[in-house]
Amino acid sequence: MTRKLFIAGNWKMNTSLADATALAGAIVEKIGSVETVDMTVCPPFPYLTSVKEALADSKIALGAQDVFYEDSGAYTGEVSTAMLKDVGCTYAICGHSERRHVIGETDELINRKVLKCISDGIMPILCVGELLTQRQADETIEVVSRQIRLGLEGVSSADMAGVTIAYEPVWAIGTGITATPDQAQDVHAMIRSLLGEIYDAATANNTQIQYGGSVKPDNAAELMNCPDIDGALVGGASLKADDFAKIVQAGK
Ligand code: PEP
């Protein structure tokens, strides 16, 4: 089967309200009607509603950068799946490396978020990836496999239809250093074969696996041409409408 490419923009803790709506508007103008690639942008929580309005009538879905696993209550600062659905989110990023390594999220916590998304109809983008020290110690496969197994604990093969995996080597995120297509493809192939082990060949074949880590217009095509790379999770370059559009067009 041919998997559709999926390109997501993670705006992180950037933009103002005015910047966010202008950026969404500019992205819609450039690529809002593209149907051959799945697309989402993930602005900061306070701007979700305004960005949703700017995305109206386009093919670009709204995504959140994070989510919590409880329905409501005394969880100061957290945002529920119901809230995300209320403002029109389709996707939520779970376990981004900045949440794992800056905030201290564990695989168990991330798994609860993934399960909550699935049960409430939000499509999770589960991020995995090794630190530079782990790559240097030849631990990439072990680390990524553990993150996948624990992150997907309790997720059925039917549920996997709504789950995206993003392989993001931590040493490549925001550093300007990109994994070479071969380095990325090796890990993506490993992830796909692991999904085949955990689930079955059809599930492995159908799952979109994005690459993330300094994806730019000039390296997007060669990365996305790799057989097991099904798009990109883009940080820095998603803050420029031109660059994000070129990355989408590279996959078109
Ligand atoms: C990211 O935010 O997931 C990311 C990959 O960032 P960047 O593209 O800036 O490396």
Image (cartoon, rainbow, N blue to C red):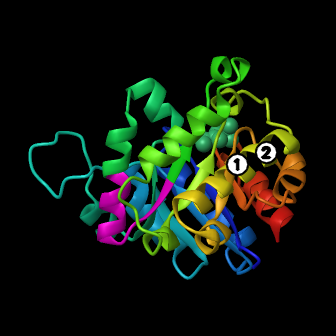
Residue type marked 1: Met
The quadrant of the picture showing ligand 1 is: top right
Look at 25% across and 65% down and name the residue there.
82
Where is mark 2, residue-wise?
186
Q: Seen in the image, is 156 located left or right of residue 210? A: left
Residue positioned most to the left: 74
Indicate the position of residue 140 as horizontal and vertical percent values.
66, 31
Position above or below: 34 against 194: below
In the rendered image, residue 215 lying in the magenta stretch gets the answer no
Q: Are marks 2 and 1 in contact (CB under 8 Å)?
A: yes
Report the disc number at residue 118: none
Q: Residues within 10 Å of mark 1 (few under 14, many from 20)?
A: some
Residue situated in front as seen by the camera: 239 or 195: 195
Quadrant assignment, res 124? bottom left
Q: Give the extent of the magenta segment.
A: 113-125
Where is mark 1, residue-wise?
190
Position above or below: 78 against 193: above
What secondary structure is the magenta-colored segment mainly? helix
In the rendered image, residue 117 lying in the magenta stretch gets the answer yes
